[in-house]
Image (tube, coloured by chain):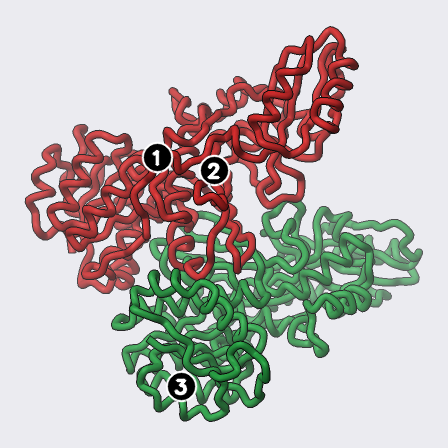
Chain colours: A red, B green
Amino acid sequence: MNIAVMGYGVVGSGVAEVLAKNHDQIVRKSRQDDMQLKYILDRRTFPGDVNEHLVVSDFSKIIEDDSVKIVVETMGGLHPAYEFVLECLNAGKSVVTSNKELVAEKGCELLKAAQEHNVNFLFEASVGGGIPIIRPITQCLAANDINEIAGILNGTTNFILTMMIKEGMDFDEALRLAQRNGYAERDPSADIEGHDACRKIAILAALCFGKHVYPADIETEGITKITLADVDYAANWGGVIKLIARAKKLENGKITAIVSPAFVEYGSQLAGVDDVFNAILVRGDAIGDVVFYGRGAGKLPTASAVVADVIDCAVHIKERKDFGWGEGEENYVQSYLDTENALYVRFTSDNKEKALSDAQEIFGGVKVLERKDAPANEGAFATPVAKEGDLREKLAKIDGITVESVIRITDY
Amino acid sequence: MNIAVMGYGVVGSGVAEVLAKNHDQIVRKSRQDDMQLKYILDRRTFPGDVNEHLVVSDFSKIIEDDSVKIVVETMGGLHPAYEFVLECLNAGKSVVTSNKELVAEKGCELLKAAQEHNVNFLFEASVGGGIPIIRPITQCLAANDINEIAGILNGTTNFILTMMIKEGMDFDEALRLAQRNGYAERDPSADIEGHDACRKIAILAALCFGKHVYPADIETEGITKITLADVDYAANWGGVIKLIARAKKLENGKITAIVSPAFVEYGSQLAGVDDVFNAILVRGDAIGDVVFYGRGAGKLPTASAVVADVIDCAVHIKERKDFGWGEGEENYVQSYLDTENALYVRFTSDNKEKALSDAQEIFGGVKVLERKDAPANEGAFATPVAKEGDLREKLAKIDGITVESVIRITDY
């Protein structure tokens, strides 16, 4: 059986490496006579690379070769990845991808195409890098009604927040360190603005709740506005700030889906997840909370998840996986304003004591927070849980304050 | 498709409950027209129970009914579970079990019987209760060479140790509380002596490393000798005491496999696992460390894992799972005495200072540990890492001490 890889970047070259290194074991587990990497599609050339002779720039080579049964897509981005993958599926080739943007935007459609041509479209590596999460959700937890899923899904932002919390670096300094360590790209916006986490929670929500969730419908906020002052107030409150992506089934048939920085209590399984590690919490009716923890990115972890999918495709070459991933619906994702939350608020005011006393009255009780060396005109508090829209309306009613920061408070 | 359950205890009745409660979803995911529980085998009767009419006491009813394609074994114990399961497999019925003793002792043989009759033998619930672990190891991490696996695999002992560490209860008091809460049985020996964890690590080691591991070959030590003094010294060292089950592949083709209390550093993913929760750490060559966390026992978590296996059997009724679980070998498990470890030692001596100075010299440097209100004749230290047999020989050379406690130190 032959394999093609499209996109010879970090993950694609990792896939080639794992296929070569664990070749015999992979052939045995795939129950094939052999598994060979036959083509690598890339516009670039790789002089001196061990796989130089496999590189082609013409996609038709792959599509026209019937010996290629499994195509790995590690190009990233929506175009031309989408067109290439669709064409592969239509040509009767199974596809494995690590491309979260592709799966989040086009998952439902591509799974349908795979079904029509009796091949598989697998994407374990698109969420959580090498952490097994897609298969556990769809198979191991199949007897559960999953009500809620939440996680730290982006290693770059988690590294930055960890450096702010543990080393007292400010955001810019921590971002520069992440870039120096190769954890953040030169243009880090997809990570730090929350878009990467947004795509991943869209995929998880579709798998858990059965309907496509469009990333654009998910309220998404990054970590660029987080300051060391907020980190200190979070500690005073009793926890840390993490970029949390979460989705929850509601009784009205809708779901909530939000990506934003959030206060997480010390002692929670998510609070202790540091550096570039990811963790995903799944709440099922029978199992309760289950947490999956590991490296959410990186060449070899991600490549190993891709190759596990390749093996699965080879073993089940005649059988189709059913993810129960249905079409999306308008207004399926409820506005965050209608969602129950508690909020942390930091403000400045010329009359801080009056503002805090007003907050107590307007919110019906707030928890006042403190930090060392706070400017005299700075105050902070945590509200009770209520509809977020109501909380924000009430906040606007406190006279004479400038709101400097609002961060959600979770109960994970 | 019809199902039979053998053993209507906690887990068996949970399976019946989950099958009924999530019936429609289970039928859909199983891709069957229907999935019905037809028999419950038990010697007892259950007057007034919702499933009273399904209870039979005669095993031949199940074996002779060709409409029963999947049999769930939740009887526990080795006999007659082993004979019944073997007969079901030989009769061409797939079997799902939560019985760790059965899988640890007879896994290789029963998988062989399943293979010969082209049916499945699945056992996700036998380790980690509802935490998905068997399938992630065998499928999701298939592209990895797994080198090491370690975990907190017994909720009862973890609850007892948590109460000792956090509430300052002594062992007997914590055990009584565990019994009052229903976490420990009236005869708690299988848990507190480490046998339950031993069976689970035997199963995991077989799956990770490909050869049957007999529980009798695993050095197993329980938590009955742990005192609050040891808990305090662990804190002074910088961590907590957990009952750790672990197995590791060695370069000489053998493995180590040990169950014992162990010092675990604060900040480790295993140190923060409290109460009845379990966690399993898997170390792969490509993925690095992955941790799975959740409830390792309990009626519904375990039942949900059993039912997920039932669904898998129904979907793959014509296809056999291959776990790569080969026969065991003599001397496959290396003696713990030849294994590299560090040890914590607590002793009493009439000349404590001399004993500590002797220890420094004999071990080539030890870390002296302290606790508040220690008796004047009590001392404690942590050794460097070395072959455990050598460490124990050296310990015997320190004159004039009575060794009160020896606990292994891990690097997880």
Residue A106: x, y in percent? 27, 38
Q: Are marks 2 and 1 on the same chain?
A: yes
Residue B175 visible in the shown view: yes
Eyeballing the image, is A12 above or below B10? Answer: above
Asked which secondary structure carries label 1, the reply is loop
The amino acid on which the numbered mark 1 sits, given as a three-letter code, is: Glu
* B131 left or right of A33 in image: right
Cα distance in 3D space between marks 2 and 3: 48 Å
The amino acid on which the numbered mark 3 sits, given as a three-letter code, is: Leu
Question: Which quarter of the picture shows residue B93?
Answer: bottom left
Say the numbered circle drawn on residue B86.
Answer: 3
Please report contact status of discs 2 and 1: CB closer than 8 Å, yes or no: no
Residue A52: x, y in percent? 17, 37
Residue that badge 1 annotates: A330
* In-front residue for pair A66/A390: A390
Q: Are marks 1 and 3 on the same chain?
A: no
Eyeballing the image, is B9 above or below A347? Answer: below
Foreground label between 2 and 1: 1
Cα distance in 3D space between marks 2 and 1: 13 Å
Question: Which quarter of the picture shows residue B261?
Answer: bottom right
How many numbered tags mark residues here? 3
The amino acid on which the numbered mark 2 sits, given as a three-letter code, is: Thr
Say the numbered circle drawn on residue A256.
Answer: 2
Eyeballing the image, is B121 above or below A12? Answer: below
Q: Chain of mark 1?
A: A
* A232 left or right of A44 in image: right
User: In the displayed image of the protein, which residue is found farthest to the left?
Assistant: A64
